[in-house]
Image (spheres, rainbow, N blue to C red):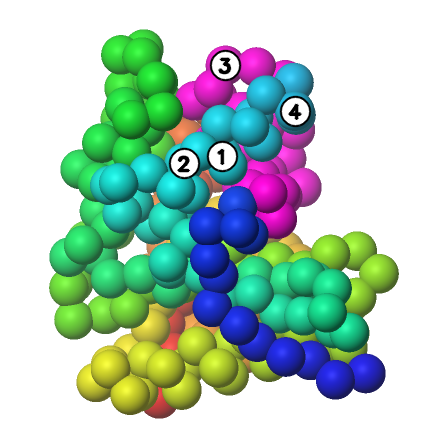
Amino acid sequence: MGITIKKATQTDAIFLAKMILQSSRAGKKDGLFDLLFETDDDAHILEKLEKLVQTDAKSYCHYTNFLIAQINGKDVGTLCSYEPRISNKDTFLKALQEIGCCEVIKDSLEIYFGCSFEIKNSTLMFDFLEELEGFLDVGVLKTLMQKSLLNARLRGYTKARTIVEIGSLETELLYKKLGFSVIEQKECEEYRELFGRNGIMLFEIEF
């Protein structure tokens, strides 16, 4: 069962939206985009996310930041890597405004960004490392990570980081298995009230 990796294009928006929603929930009832789009209608959320990955503002959700894993031509996994100097809070807000999100999202975003770490521009960030059910343990996520780290080396990076919610045990174990280590942890009461998780952990890998 051969795994191939390709760069995402606009035509992959539907699949990327599905993986972003799956990743943002991470076992919770509601993730960031459930709250931002103020609905429990998955079809509506996915429609918004399809637009979000294609905005002019290149937020961290933009399709150009993604790699997609395929098996026999079928999309089975994703990994996003982005540069904080380009894809930051401001570009995320601009992207949300492009797809018609109103001012009320700012309260939720303030809590979301309030429980965060200072990210240096010299570090590459990873997010949305996800795979479809039925393709676990066939090496999809490891292959995605290996390809992303190779690309990062070619771009001159020596470190990469990712943020994992406290209590998201499967994701935590996955990143540790891939060679990441926890370097910082932050607990936030407002974050717990909003998302049901005590806070976040910052993972890092050097390569």
> What is the distance, in whole Å, between disc 3 and disc 2 at their CAs?
15 Å
Quote the CA–CA distance across marks 2 and 4. Answer: 14 Å
Mark 1–mark 2 contact, CB under 8 Å? yes
Q: Are marks 1 and 4 in contact (CB under 8 Å)?
A: no
| Percent coordinates x, y for residue 200 in the rendering | 42, 48
* CB within 8 Å, label 3 to label 4: no
Image quarter (top left, top right, bottom left or bottom right) of the N terminus: bottom right
Q: Which residue is mark 4?
A: 43
Circle nearer the N terminus (1, 3): 3
Residue pushed farthest front? 11
113 is higher (above) or lower (below) than 204: above
Mark sitting earlier along the chain (1/4): 4
Q: Residues within 10 Å of mark 1 (few under 14, many from 20)?
A: many
Q: Callout 1, which amino acid?
A: Leu
Which disc, if any, is residue 49? 1
Q: Is residue 102 left or right of residue 26?
A: left
Task: Work out how far the residue at label 1 is from the one at label 2, CA to CA, in angstroms.
Answer: 5 Å
Mark closer to the observer (1, 3): 1
